[in-house]
Image (tube, rainbow, N blue to C red):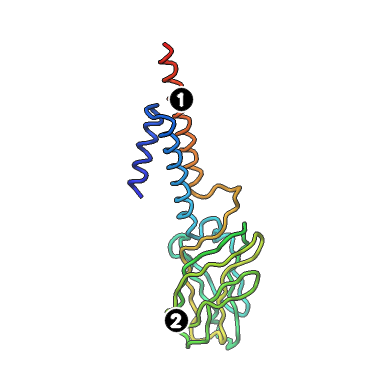
Amino acid sequence: MKPVFARFAGALSEVALGRTNASQGLVALCCVLGASCFLAERAKADFITPCGLGDFTLTNSNANGSVMTPDGGMSIILDGGDNGTGEFGTTDFVTTAQAAGTVVFQWSYFSTDLPGDDFAGFLVNNVYTQLSGNSGDNGSISFSVTQGESFGFEMQTLTNTGGPGILTVSDFSAPLPSSVPEPGTAGMLLLSSLAVAGLVAGRALKTRKARQ
């Protein structure tokens, strides 16, 4: 990644000093835009934006589940119910899709309870899809949502005893409204604007010198 930005920095410097031609300037601009898209994709792989933890709602139904983030929003750990009632319960952690697109995440499941007593899954418009009830399972999931649809995660417990099911979710990505700049994009677009401005200024300076 560093060599890419080193080359970009050099190209931007040449443009700003008026030492490049129009074709080279366009190449530099394309590098900027490509880098901005790359950063935007990487920046979305968390629970910070576009769907931050504050955008989700935790709901327990005959359960005492909880959610936490061990790394400042890069991943979450969702615990299911274990309130000792001996009855079925659910713990939901749900948000609303801000745009149509694909939700992607990595997951892993752990439980000290007997296999089949607790389950982890995800929700789309209140429709539950099971991920696992076997401790140690893991994988990756992607599914489509439309703007305004609810989606998220659900932990189920059959007995609320024996220890909770635990779902860890990481590399989370959700669709972002096109009208909102993605993280990292705004800064890179500013740099691209500066590159164009430098190109124009450099060419204007050359033109003035040629006329003198």
Name which residue lies at 44% across and 29% down.
Answer: 199
Q: Relative to the observer, which residue lies in front, 13 or 183?
A: 13
Crowd band around label 1 with a 10 angstrom C-alpha radius: few (<14), some (14–19), many (20+): some
What residue sits 56% from the left and 87% below the top?
159
Tag 1 or tag 2, which sits nearer the N-term?
2
Observer-nearest of 126 and 20: 20
Q: Is residue 132 above or below residue 181?
A: below
The answer to whether residue 92 is above or below residue 196 is below
Q: Are marks 2 and 1 in contact (CB under 8 Å)?
A: no
Question: Which amino acid type is marked by label 2?
Answer: Ser
Secondary element at image label 1: helix
Label 2 and label 1: CA atoms lie apart by: 62 Å
Instruction: Give the amino acid at mark 1.
Output: Ala
Along the viewing direction, whichever of 203 and 109 lies nearer the viewer? 203
Q: Where residue 201 is drawn, which disc sits there?
A: 1
* Residue density around tag 2, few if under 14, some if 14–19, many if 20 or more, within 10 Å: many
Indicate the quadrant where residue 156 lies: bottom right
Q: Mark 2 — residue?
A: 135
Task: Indicate the position of residue 59 as horizontal and vertical percent values.
Answer: 61, 71
Q: Identify the residue shown where x is 37% and y is 44%.
A: 5
Residue at far front of view: 23
Which quadrant is home to the C terminus? top left
> Measured along the vertical axis of the image, is residue 157 above or below residue 122?
below
* Disc 2, SS: loop
Q: Is residue 66 above or below residue 210?
A: below
Residue in the image at 49% along x and 35% along y: 193
Query: Seen in the image, is 7 located left or right of residue 57?
Result: left
Among the 4 quarters of the image, the one containing residue 208: top left
Label ID, residue 211:
none
